[in-house]
Image (tube, rainbow, N blue to C red):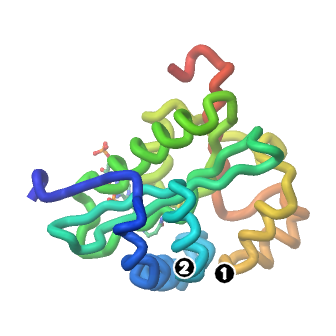
């Protein structure tokens, strides 16, 4: 099975998976504990077209996905929308996707701070291994458009009540200018 897992930067040949990716994200977003925002098939399609996403396939079946977004004029890059199909969880696929998304982000935006918001212990572990560390939300981007992206998360009311300072997700940052990251 290990050898059948393909994790690559998504290219136009993967556009056909946009609807399925959006459906997987929607399904996972219904779990209050997940803290995952929904994304439309069109949004996913654009991420694939822009060369800003990573896809995992197992024998051509969709196994997982993640995309990157930039904020504050490329000062910050978020790796978002990480999803692994329940059928393929626990096989190291999220780790592989995040590693590829990390390389993609570093290739495209070598000076940017990479960050993510997550409630997932698996993702916290993966991020820590990549050199991310937990930070308060004040250290994340101030870009309103980023926080607007949380609107479709089922916990958005909490974020608003807390004036964007805290919510259920842990914020994590990789700062390329901190030597101990590498
Ligand atoms: C979170 C998610 C992406 C993990 O995907 P996965 O492919 O099963 O994760 P991996 O197999 O790559 O596991 C990565 C690491 O986390 C650990 N891990 C996996 N699931 C875990 C769990 N539920 N609790 C704690 N650790 C876990 C693994 O042991 C592994 O650690 P290791 O490298 O030391 O072996 C997947 O469960 C998912 O899609 N969940 C729903 C959506 C979601 O929460 N997305 C994250 C949004 S930030």
Kindly identify which residue carries mark 2: 29
Q: Position of residue 83 (x, y in %)?
A: 43, 67
Q: Which residue is more in the foreground, 73 or 96?
A: 73
Q: Which residue is more in the foreground, 122 or 82?
A: 82
Query: Whereabouts is ligand 1, in terms of quadrant?
Result: bottom left
Secondary structure at badge 1 equals loop
Farthest residue toward the top?
179
Horizontally, residue 148 falls left or right of residue 99, namely right
The residue that appears at 69% across and 80% down in the rendered structure is 152
| Disc ID at residue 154 | 1
Locate the N terminus and report the quarter of the image it occupies.
bottom left
Horizontally, residue 134 falls left or right of residue 28, namely right
Residue 113 versus residue 28 in the image, above or below: above
The local crowd at label 1, few if under 14, some if 14 to 19, many if 20 or more residues have their Cα within 10 Å, is some
Secondary structure at badge 2 equals helix
Which of the 4 image quarters holds residue 57? bottom left
Give the Cα separation between the discs numbered 2 and 1.
7 Å
Which of the 4 image quarters holds residue 129? top left
The residue that appears at 45% across and 78% down in the rendered structure is 18
Q: Position of residue 81 (x, y in %)?
A: 54, 65
Ligand 1 lies under 8 Å from the Cβ of mark 2: no
Q: CB of mark 2 within 8 Å of CB of mark 1?
A: yes
Q: Position of residue 70 (x, y in %)?
A: 70, 50
């Amino acid at each position: 099975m290990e050898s059948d897992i393909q994790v690559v930067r998504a290219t136009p040949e993967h556009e056909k998976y946009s609807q399925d990716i959006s459906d997987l994200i929607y399904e996972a977003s219904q779990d209050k504990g997940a803290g995952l925002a929904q994304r439309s098939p069109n949004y996913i399609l654009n991420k694939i077209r822009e060369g800003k996403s990573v896809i995992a396939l197992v024998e051509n079946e969709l196994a997982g996905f993640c995309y990157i977004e930039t904020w504050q004029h490329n000062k910050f890059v978020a790796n978002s929308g990480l999803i692994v199909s329940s059928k393929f969880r626990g096989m190291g696929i999220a780790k592989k996707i995040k590693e590829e998304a990390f390389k993609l982000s570093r290739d495209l935006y070598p000076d940017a701070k990479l960050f993510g918001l997550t409630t997932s212990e698996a993702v916290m572990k993966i991020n820590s291994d990549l050199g991310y560390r937990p930070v308060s939300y004040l250290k994340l981007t101030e870009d309103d458009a980023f926080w607007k992206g949380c609107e479709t998360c089922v916990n958005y009311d909490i974020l608003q009540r807390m004036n964007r300072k805290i919510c259920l997700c842990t914020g994590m940052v990789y700062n390329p200018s901190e030597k101990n990251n590498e």
